[in-house]
Image: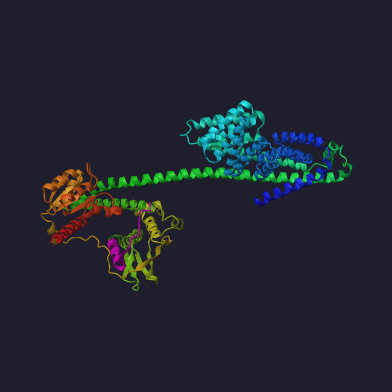
Amino acid sequence: MQYTLFTLRSISLMLFFIIALPAHSWSQETAQSAKEYSRLHEQGVLALEQNNYPEALISLSLAIQEAAAAENKVAQASIQLSLAQLHYNIHNFDQAALQVHSAIELLRDQNNTALIAQAQTLLGYIYVENGKWEEAEIFLHLADQYFLNSGAIESRAQVLLGYGALSIKQKQFSEAINYLEAAKNTFNNQQDLSKLAKTELLLAEASIKIDPELLPNSLNKAKDALAKALNLASENGFVSIGIEGLRLESYLSLRANKFNEAEEFLTRYEQKSDSLHQHYLNTIIAQSGADNGDLASLNQIINQQKSDLDRQQRSISFSKITTGLSIALIIILSLLTLSLYKNNNLRAKANILLQDKNSELQLAKEKAEKASMVKAEFLSTITHELRTPMYAVTGLTHLLLEENPKPEQKEHLRSLQFSGEYLLNLINNILDLNKLEANKVEIEKTTFNLKKRLNDVLIALNKIAVDRKNNLRLEYDDEIPEKLEGDSVKLSQILINLIGNSLKFTQNGDVIVRVSKLGEKNNKITLHFEIEDNGVGISKKKQKSIFESFSQASLQINRKFGGTGLGLSIVKSLLELMGSRIQLESQLGKGSKFWFDLALEISTQGATEEQGAKQLAENEYSVLENRHILVVEDNKINQMITRKILEKRNIICQVADNGMDAIKLVESNDFDVVLMDIHMPGISGIEATQEIRKFKPDLPIIALTAVTIEENLDEFYRVGFSEIILKPFKTEEFFEKIHRTLTQDTSASK
C-alpha cells in the first residue's frame, strides 16, 4: 500500500511537470488562457459529475496547465480542489489530501477565505474517510467558524454533513443524527439533490446502528431514510448512493433475522460495486487503446486552441510527444488509483463483515456465559432437591435391612440400596464435572503415603473385582519414597475412576495397577501410573471421544455395563488441572491400558493426611447410649428416619421443625449434640447456630445437610459447626462422626 501511494505521488509530480513544460510558451496570451482554463475546468467538472473520471482527469489537468500559464493562483487552487474531489470520489484519499493542501498553499496570500473554507471542508471529508479523525475535526471546525462568522448557512450545511459522517465513524450515533437532520433541511431547501441523497443515506446508517433505547422506532426511521436516498439515487443517476444502499439493506435484513435476504443484498452490493469498478477500468483501457488518429484528433484540437501563439509551429512535434506521455501517465495514474480504490473497498467490506462477526461472537459469548450461570444455579438447586429424597431412600433401606427382613425381601432391599448408591454416585459425578468446567476446583497439597493410598483404593474396589470374578493386583516400585506431597484426594478419585472402569469392562480377567518411578530431580519425583486390563477393549473410532462428557464406547456397552460416561471425562479434567495428561492404548477384544505421568514433591515432614471415616466397634457404641440429641429438620420423613436410626442405638432423640424452635429448646434443655439442617423455613441452620453460640459456645453442633459444601468448609466451621455430615450418609460414617464429636468434647472438658 505504501509503495502504491508513493508511486501515485511520483507519477502525479511527473505528470504535472511534463504537462507544464509547454505552458511557458503560451504565457503571453493570459486572456485567451483564462478563457481556456475556465472552459476546460467546466468540462472537467461536468465529466466528474457524470462519473467519467478518465475524461475528468484529462480536462482538469489541462485546465491546471492553462491556469498556471495565466499565473492565476485562485483559478489553479479552484481546479485543484475539483481534482481533489475526483480523487476523493475514487477513494484515493492521500492524493486528494495532497491536492487540497496544494490549493490551500496557493490561496495563502490571495485573501480568498471563502475558497479556503471550502478547501478545509473537503479536507475534513477526506480525513473522515482516511481514519484521521482528529485532523478531520480540526479542519471541519475551521471551516465551520468561517461560515458562521460570514453567515453562509448554506455552505455550513456541508460542514454539518461532514460532522455527521465523522460522528458515525466515532460511533456517536445520536450526535450524527442531530448534525445530519440539520444539514438535510438546508439541502432540501437548496434542492441540492446529491448532498440530500448522501445525507439520507448516512441518516439511515446512523439509525440502524444506534441503541434502540436512545432512538425509539429506530429501524423504521432507518428504512424511511434509506428509501428516500435510494429514490433520489434512482431518479438522478447517483450510482454510488444506490450501491451503498444495498449494503444498508443487508444490515436491515440482518437486524430482522432475514439471513437469506441479507446475503442476497450483500451479494448484489458486491456485484454492482465490482461492476462499477470494472466499468471505470474498461473506459480507461478503451481510452489507452485509441489509435493514432484519435491522438492526432486530440492534438489537432489542442493545436487549434493555441493557433494564435507565436511559437506553436516550432513546438508541434514536442507537444505531440508530451501530450502522448501525459495521456499515458494519466492512464497509468487512473489505473493505479482505481486499483487502490478497489483494494480499499474490499478492505472496507472485510472490516464490515469482521465487525458483524465480532458482534455475533460477542452475543454468542454473552449467551454462553448466561447459560453457564443458569446451569450452575440449576445444579446447585437440583442437588439439594435430589439429595433430600435420596436420604429417604437410603435411610429407609438401612432401617428395613436392620429389621430382619425375609431372605427374598433382603435381596430386594439390597437392590434398592445399590440403586440408591448408584444414583448418589451419578449426582456426585455431575457436580464434580460442573465444578471442573467452572474452574472452581483447586489443587490442595497434603503429605501422604502413596502405597497406603493405593491399597485403600484397591480395598474399596475389591468387592467389584470379586463380583466380576477379576484378579486385581498392584505392581509397586519400591524405589518410590514413602512420603509424598500432593493432592491425594484427587489422585484417589482419578485412580478409582480408572480402576473401576477397567473392572466394569472386564470379567474373569486381570486388572493390573502399576506405579513406577521415572525420574527424580530437585526434591521432585515423576511417577508413571498404568491401569491395564484384558477386557472388552475400545475401538479406534471411539478412542478419540471416550474422554468427552457422557461418552461411551457404544449403545450396547451402555446397556450391558451401565454408567454415564462421566468418569473418564473427570479423570481427563483432573489430570490437566494437575499438569498431566491421560493416555490410552486399546484393542477390541484384547483389553485396554490407561496411563499418565505425574510429578509430586518428596516430603521431609511427617504424614499429615486426614484419616478416613472408620466403622465403630460394637463396644464403642456404648458411649452413645442415653445421650440426648436434638434433631433440627423441617422434612417430616427425614425427621422420622434420623430419629429411628438414633433410637436404635438407645439414643434419646428430640426433634425441632425449624431454627427458632431449636433455639428455644437448646435454651431450656441440656443436649449432648445438635444435628442441624441448613435450609429451613424462617431462619437458616447457620443463623440458628450463630444464635445458639451466643449462650452455649461449647455445645457440639453438627451440620446435617443435603447441600454440597466442599468449597465453603472454612465458612461452616467459622460460624460455629463442630462437624459436617452430608446427606445422604452412610450410617457407619454418621455414627463415627457423632462418636468423634462427643469424645473430643469430653476430652476438651477434662
**Residue at the (50%, 32%) spot, across then down:** 218
- Looking at the image, can residue 624 be seen? yes
Q: How many marks?
A: 0
In the rendered image, residue 205, in percent from the top left (x then y), is placed at 55, 35
Classify 743 as above or below 11: below
Q: How is the image coloured?
A: rainbow
In the rendered image, residue 83, in percent from the top left (x then y), is placed at 70, 40
Q: Quadrant of the C terminus?
A: bottom left
Classify 616 as above or below 300: below
**Residue at the (48%, 36%) spot, across then down:** 211
Residue found at the very far bottom of the displayed protein: 479
- Residue 490 colored in magenta in the image: no
**Residue at the (67%, 52%) spot, across then down:** 3
Provide the residue span drawn in magenta.
438-462
In the rendered image, residue 678, in percent from the top left (x then y), is placed at 23, 47
- Frontmost residue, 233 versus 457: 233
- Looking at the image, can residue 258 be seen? no
Instruction: Find residue 282 and report its image quarter.
Output: top right
Instruction: Find residue 485 and report its image quarter.
Output: bottom left
Instruction: Find residue 320 and report its image quarter.
Output: top right
- Frontmost residue, 340 versus 738: 340
- Residue 447 colored in magenta in the image: yes
In the rendered image, residue 158, in percent from the top left (x then y), is placed at 61, 34
Residue found at the very far top of the displayed protein: 189
